Image (cartoon, grey):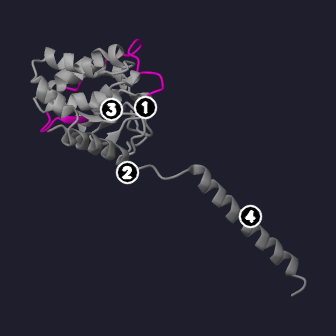
C-alpha cells in the first residue's frame, strides 16, 4: 500500500488541478446570453445599449439595404427607448423617419421615454411636453419638433416657454397643455416607460428593440436597423 501512496497523491493533485481549471474557464466565459438576444449568426446581434455620451449613429458611410419583397401578416415592431435631449437620439431621429417612410405598413415604430435626468436637465420636461401633446392627439408632431429643434432648448434654463410655443404652432389648447405637463397622469406614463425599459435591460439611449430583441448599440446605424428589420420581415413572411 505504501508503494502506491505517492501515485494516489499525484492522482488527487491532478484531479484538483483540472477542477480548478474548469472553474476558471467557466468564470471567464461570463454569464449566459439573455433569451431576447439574437444569435451571433443572426446579425445585427444585440447586447448592452450605449450611453448618451457615446458617438452618435452615422449614416455617412452606410449602404442602404433594400427591404425584402415579402408579404407579412403583421408589421415588424421597432421600439425605441429615447431621451429628447440625448445627441445620439437626435441624430438617430431622421434615420428612423427615413426608414419608416421606406417600409410603410411593414413597420410600426413605438417610442418609449427614457430620460437620463442625471445627464440631461431638460429631458424629463421634454418628455412631459410630448405626453401633454399626446392628450390632444399630437404626440408625434411634438416628438418631431423636440428632436428637430433639440439644440434650441437643450441647455435652456427653462425650456417650458419653448415647448408652449411648439404647442401653439400645433394649434393645441394651451391651457390644457400647460395643465397636462404637470399632471400625475403624464408623470405616471413616463415612469411606466422608464420601468419597462429598466426591466428589459435598458441603461442608456438610444436603445432599439426589433420584435422584442435589443439591437446592439454598435449596430444602431441605418444599415444595422435595416438588416434587423429585414431579418424579422423574412421570419414573418407569409406565402
> In whole angstroms, how far apart are the C-alphas of marks 1 and 3?
23 Å
Is the C-beta separation of discs 1 and 3 under 8 Å? no
Percent of width and height locating residue 220 = 38, 28
Q: Secondary structure at mark 3?
A: helix
Mark 4 is surrounded, within 10 Å at the Cα level, by few (under 14), some (14 to 19) or many (20 or more) other residues, namely few
Q: Nearer the viewer, mark 4 or mark 1?
A: 1
Q: Nearer the viewer, mark 1 or mark 2?
A: 1
Q: Secondary structure at mark 1?
A: helix
From the viewer's perspective, is residue 141 above or below residue 107? above
Mark 3 is surrounded, within 10 Å at the Cα level, by few (under 14), some (14 to 19) or many (20 or more) other residues, namely many
Q: Is residue 55 magenta?
A: yes
> In whole angstroms, how far apart are the C-alphas of marks 2 and 4?
33 Å
The image quarter in which residue 101 lies: top left
Range shown magenta: 52-78
Q: Which mark is residue 17?
A: 4
> In whole angstroms, how far apart are the C-alphas of marks 3 and 2?
31 Å
Q: Secondary structure at mark 4?
A: helix
Return the residue at label 3: 124
Precedes in sequence: disc 1 or disc 3 = 3
From the viewer's perspective, is residue 69 above or below residue 204? above
Precedes in sequence: disc 1 or disc 2 = 2
Q: Nearer the viewer, mark 3 or mark 4?
A: 3
Is the C-beta separation of discs 4 and 1 under 8 Å? no
Return the residue at label 1: 217
The image quarter in which residue 37 lies: top left
Q: Is residue 12 magenta?
A: no
Amino acid at each position: 500500500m505504501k508503494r502506491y501512496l505517492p501515485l494516489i497523491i499525484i492522482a488527487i493533485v491532478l484531479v484538483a488541478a483540472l477542477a480548478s481549471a474548469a472553474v476558471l474557464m467557466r468564470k471567464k466565459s461570463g454569464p449566459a446570453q439573455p433569451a431576447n438576444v439574437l444569435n451571433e449568426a443572426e446579425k445585427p446581434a444585440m447586447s448592452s445599449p450605449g450611453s448618451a455620451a457615446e458617438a452618435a449613429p452615422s449614416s455617412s458611410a452606410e449602404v442602404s439595404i433594400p427591404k425584402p419583397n415579402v408579404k407579412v401578416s403583421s408589421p415588424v415592431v421597432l421600439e425605441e427607448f429615447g431621451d429628447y435631449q440625448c445627441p445620439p437620439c437626435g441624430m438617430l431621429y431622421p434615420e428612423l423617419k427615413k426608414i419608416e417612410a421606406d417600409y410603410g405598413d411593414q413597420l410600426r415604430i413605438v417610442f418609449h421615454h427614457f430620460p437620463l435626468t442625471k445627464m440631461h436637465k431638460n429631458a424629463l420636461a421634454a418628455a412631459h411636453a410630448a405626453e401633454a401633446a399626446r392628450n390632444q392627439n399630437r404626440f408625434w408632431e411634438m416628438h418631431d419638433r423636440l428632436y428637430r429643434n433639440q439644440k434650441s432648448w437643450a441647455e435652456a434654463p427653462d425650456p417650458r416657454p419653448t415647448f408652449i410655443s411648439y404647442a401653439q404652432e400645433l394649434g393645441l389648447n394651451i391651457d390644457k397643455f400647460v395643465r397636462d405637463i404637470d399632471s400625475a397622469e403624464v408623470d405616471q406614463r413616463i415612469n411606466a416607460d422608464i420601468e419597462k425599459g429598466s426591466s428589459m435591460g435598458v441603461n442608456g439611449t438610444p436603445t432599439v428593440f426589433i420584435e422584442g430583441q435589443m439591437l446592439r448599440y454598435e449596430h444602431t446605424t441605418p444599415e444595422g436597423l435595416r438588416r434587423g428589420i429585414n431579418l424579422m420581415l423574412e421570419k414573418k413572411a407569409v406565402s
